[in-house]
Amino acid sequence: MSKWFQDSVVYQIYPRSFQDSNNDGIGDLNGIRQRLPYLKKLGVDVLWLNPIYKSPDVDNGYDISDYEAIQPNYGTMNDFDLLLSQIHDNDMKLLMDLVVNHTSDQHYWFQESKKSKTNPYSDYYIWRDPVDGHEPNNWGSAFSGPAWTYVSERGQYYLHLFAAGQPDLNWENPQVREEVYSLMRFWLDKGVDGFRMDVINLISKPSGLPDADQDGGAAYGDSFDIVSGGPRLNEFLKEMNQKVLSRYDIMTVGEMPDSTPEEAINYTNLNGTELDMIFQFEHVNLGGNPDPRLEKWNDQPVKLSELKEALSRWQVALDGKAWNSLYWGNHDQPRVVSRFGSDEPRYRELSAKMLATTLHMMQGTPYIYEGEELGMTNVHFKTLSQYEDIESINAYHQLVEIEKVVDPDRMLDYLSFMSRDNSRTPMQWNDEKNAGFTDASEPWYALNPNYQEINAKDELENYNSVFYYYQSLIKIRHESELVRYGSYELLDPKDEEVFAYKRHYNGQTLLVMSNFTEQNVERNYQQEDGELLLGNYSDSQKYLRPYETKVYKFG
Ligand code: NOJ
């Protein structure tokens, strides 16, 4: 028997950039409510909101100072209740973002914790004495610099795997875990339908907090590598499941950087004792810089054989044992069409549809990131001052100015290709002022100037648009058990031009062929014996044209 999350398509909303309703230039909850008919028309089942809780916004809401309050920019708790009930009235569900590896340093718990070694919150965070007057170990923060900050009141350092404004909670402390369960119940009792769990595989730290590997001249040790999948992770997730999750009819997806298929099976077995699925990173982490100090900062296309290998391994390994999440993009990734397809006007729509087909015909729960269904592209900023995100800005300062391992122009090229800011520009609703995102004179963040050509209004008026293509993909999934549950077989793994695979279910077969190049290529998989279900060109030829994709059904 399938569970509802296996039959669903999720749409991710970045609230700041989705729709402003009160003309302050910032997206909000009432804005999301106004756009429910659009989402209903697309056909998605579940909406996932990035954090909407009270936050000083050091990391755009991933630094929470009050888990039970709405960020005033986004509206009020009444606005939230109304949004939730209208989502339910529309037969859709709502996932909240659960950020409990860390809080904001402005959270009451941290404000108290940092005062002394003896207060009731003193053990809510991970505090350590200096070692020889320095940080307790070599761990680096994901946002550059050390993962430790010194607080003179305590004479100790606290751990933050992200920004200094995001201290890590001490999950070893049972009181901390009970606080987390209680805030989860607060939202579940309101009726939310589940959680996307931020970096949940980092909550259990290795005992003794040993130094991490520090390869190739990197300034700090690789903290994610040593922390992810820590010794008590299974135990914590089981406890959370038993005390909270199992008591509600909900879905959960755990963000797990650096995880393997074996770990996914371990944390998301289909028995429902921990989580329902995870976000793995293998396909989006491809194409990193050969210089390990530069990590993800690069501007080179990924080899198709590597992309196929990464995605296919998960398809095969999890089949019947766990459940995949399927995503190309989110608020931490550049726009998929610019990264894995082409954002040149003549190929943009074709490659957006091709990429969507390649992913949506796989086994798992697809996640669509806002604007992806329009084929929105990277914004291609030219100067550092145009960037807003802490990761991008800190990486520039660290790598260009402090470590001097890359020159400024090259780093700007890397940011233009890989920065998270690319996906955070406002939604492009129409070709009018501020793309219909806000009536304020300035949106909180620059619009991609291409909103004149790429916007929802035009796409809704054109049946060949990327929007309607996504609508078809969602419909096919809803109607086809073969698409939802079929097993997966990769064809020709070494082919660097075409991504072809089959799905098998109850004697039926699906064949997907996607041309990742700008050339015509011919492949023979006896497709002429099948029924053409979907394609991104209006007619059919014997060969595949640039970025052509085709889906055939047999039996
Ligand atoms: C993962 C989130 O998706 C990202 O946006 C955030 O910066 C980090 N976790 C820290 O919470």
Image (tube, rainbow, N blue to C red):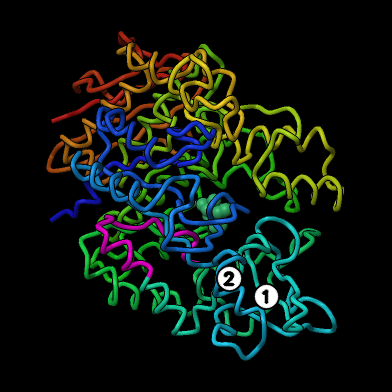
Which numbered disc covers residue 168? 2
Q: Is residue 467 left or right of residue 431?
A: left
Lower sequence index among marks 1 and 2: 1
Residue span colored magenta? 183-201
The location of residue 69, given as percent across then percent down, is 43, 59
Q: Residue at x 48, y 66 (%)?
A: 100
Badges 1 and 2: C-beta atoms under 8 Å apart? yes
Which numbered disc covers residue 158? 1
- The answer to whether residue 322 is above or below residue 125 is above
Residue 303: quarter of image: top right
Q: Is residue 384 left or right of residue 94?
A: right
- The answer to whether residue 108 is above or below residue 317 is below
Look at the numbered disc 1 and give the secondary structure of its residue. strand
473 or 498, which is in the foreground?
Answer: 473
Q: Quadrant of the C terminus?
A: top left
The location of residue 391, given as percent across then percent down, is 66, 49
Q: Residue at x 16, y 41 (%)?
A: 481
Residue 147 among those drawn in magenta: no
Number of numbered callouts drawn: 2
Q: Is residue 14 left or right of residue 153?
A: left
**Residue with the most extreme bottom position:** 118
Q: Residue at x 33, y 10 (%)?
A: 541
- The answer to whether residue 240 is above or below residue 526 is below
Task: Kindly identify the amino acid type of the residue bearing the numbered disc 1.
Answer: Tyr
**Separation of disc 1 and disc 2 at Cα?**
8 Å
Look at the numbered disc 2 and give the secondary structure of its residue. loop
Residue 388 in sight: yes
The location of residue 455, given as percent across then percent down, is 44, 19
- The answer to whether residue 464 is above or below residue 514 is above
